[in-house]
Amino acid sequence: MTRSELVAALAADHPHLTLGDVERIITALFDEMTASLARGDRVELRGFGAFSVKRRQARAGRNPRTGETVDVTEKTVPFFRAGRELREMINGGSSSDAPHAKPHKGPKR
């Protein structure tokens, strides 16, 4: 789902809001989440997941085209961890089916 599809879906679900209102709400939400992550804060949306930032240390990498060793500088990257309810919903269950069950990790492919 793209941002414009999200805006259109929310506007359709809430006809009392204009398309412009929904766009401003989505923009404000994403801007605040981005600002919080930029400050190094964690953003948690209960039932959905948590966004945080992780620091990756400098390391020696490899240019896949030439095979040459290159230095990769230290950087901070965004990280998302899905919440239990989201994982269960994706796997076909509901959060009330197995409240304390851990999701099964299948074989790697």
Image (cartoon, helix red, strand yellow):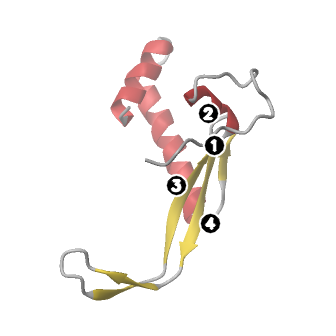
Q: Earlier in the sequence, mark 3 or mark 2?
A: 3
Instruction: Look at mark 1 in the image and give the residue it sits on.
Output: 49
Neighbour tally class for label 4: few under 14, some 14-19, many 20 plus, Cα within 10 Å: some
Amino acid carrying mark 4 in the image: Gly
Circles 4 and 2: CB atoms closer than 8 Å: no
Classify the position of the N terminus by image quarter.
Answer: top left
Residue 34 badge:
3
Q: Is residue 18 visible?
A: no
The reply to whether callout 1 and callout 2 are in contact (CB within 8 Å) is yes
Disc 2 element: helix
Spatial CA distance of label 3 from label 2 is 21 Å
SS state under label 4: loop
Q: Amino acid at mark 2?
A: Leu
Question: What whole-number distance in Å separates the C-alpha atoms at marks 4 and 3?
Answer: 10 Å
Give residue 109's position: percent from left, percent from top: 43, 47
Q: Which mark is residue 37?
A: none
Q: Of the residues shown, which amino acid type is indicated by label 1?
A: Gly
User: Where is 105 relative to 25, above or below?
Assistant: below
32 sits left or right of 68 in the view: right
On screen, residue 108 versus residue 2, left or right, reads: right
**Quadrant of the image occupied by residue 18:** top left
**Type of amino acid under label 3:** Thr
| Residue picked out by circle 2 | 86
